[in-house]
Image (cartoon, rainbow, N blue to C red):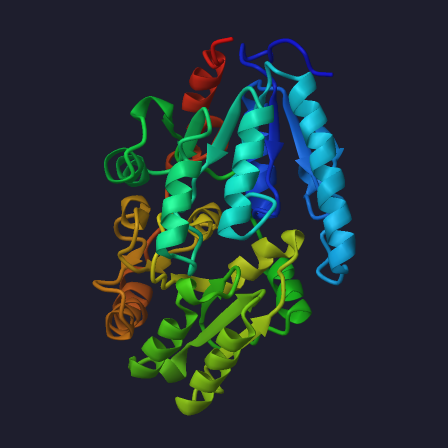
Amino acid sequence: MTQGLSLAGCPPVYLLSNGFQPEYEIAFANGLSDIGVRVILISSDNTLVQRARPAIEIHNLRGSQSEGRSKIEKAKNLLNYWRKVIRLMRSEPKAIFHFNGLFSTRGPWANFLEALAIRFFCRQWWLTVHNLVPHDTNSDLRQRLNRNIYRLPDVLMVHTQKMMAELKYDWGLNGKKLLHVEHGIEMPLEANADTAKHAAEKYAIQVDKPIVLCFGNIAPYKGADLMIQALALSRCASNIRLVVIGRARDSNFLSLLHALVREQHLENSVQILDRYVDDGDLPGVLHLAELIALPYRHIDQSGVLFTAKAAKRPVLATPVGSISEYLEMDFDLLAPAVTAVALAESLNQWYYHRRNELQPKAPEAESLDRHLWKNTLKPYLQQAATSGRPA
């Protein structure tokens, strides 16, 4: 058991990610540990436990997350997981149970029922809100249910002031339960020519031209199709290579991307690689790119942006959410609109002017230091040290 306060003066924190991005999960846990919080990480077989700080307690309650499991296996695993979590909640009334942004179920009604169960069993429930509703699943029902879900936790943690304002003024949430913690990075992502060469060979990335990289889950909201269309409209299409790499869970969208490449005759300028990039290979893959593309249709904030910062790579982003607030002047580019035409203009600007003439310098070390989780999590520590619901 983990009774008592952490060295930092706050209750122990049980961290539950329920399938959220493994990179975010371990970096967030390490950041809490770095500032003296006692962290108990409720992990799965996919958790990057080899990167956990020595002080972090690891409890693998979720086990295998293989997509090849049968429905019966998944149901048994889920029931066993919740049986153990509820036992912990009942035995640790003073601990914070922080959900990193996802429930273990995916449907709107299932999420609502799960939230009610958590509220019933959990004395201190914290929830990170990354997006008001899940990407590409917005509906009246989802909005109504999420409004009620967000009223249940003791603390809602968000990464931007914009989302703070939306939850308070548009969704009617009590401002006292909202906690703003800026998204962080764990450490700079360093690479060299050898690690980059290894990544290129392992993932079959063609390196004969300057590379513009779209990475992460390949989903409609991330706008890889807009980037392909932008490349077709640009004047530099034959001079650069767009590499789209990540897991595509939507087979129809993946087929659409391949069709766009054929229709625009971009076979020699676009690579679409439907595969997960291993954690250890990420620095090498990023080192291959001269520009990271974030052509999002909608998002509040992107972990990819901070990964690019950690790798000291410039980004080309669309004006959505709070992304523009974190771009570096004379280093990153912001497209004037969420359109292929606007992205093409910015791509031309980067290739013909920014890349060849300005040669912008990477952000200074002080800028990266400001974004380290151990620094951005200070408001979390202050909130946690005074947390607790009345008996």
Closer to the camera, 104 or 202? 104
Image vertical order of residue 157 relative to residue 70, above or below? above
Q: Residue at x 42, y 61 (%)?
A: 136
266 to the left or right of 50: left
Q: On the rendered structure, is 241 left or right of 14?
A: left
Q: Position of residue 137 (x, y in %)?
A: 43, 58
The picture places residue 251, in percent across and down from the top left corner, at: 56, 74
In the image, farthest residue toward the left: 336
* 205 versus 59 height, above or below: below
Q: Is residue 272 above or below residue 194?
A: below
Would you identify the image quadrant in which residue 236 lies? bottom left
Left or right of 79 in this view: 135: left
Using the image as rendered, state which of residue 60 and residue 269 is in the foreground: 60
**Residue 350, position as x, y percentages in the image:** 30, 67
Q: Is residue 53 visible?
A: no
Determine if residue 343 is in view: yes
Looking at the picture, does residue 297 appear above or below residue 321? below
Q: Residue at x 40, y 31 (%)?
A: 151
| Residue 303 location (% of width, % of height) | 46, 48
Q: Give left or right: position of 148 versus 202.
A: left
Q: Tell me where residue 150 sits by quadrant.
A: top left
Q: Nearer the viewer, residue 348 or 320?
A: 320
Quadrant, the N terminus: top right
Q: Report the label total.
A: 0
Q: Looking at the rendering, which quadrant does residue 260 occupy?
A: bottom left
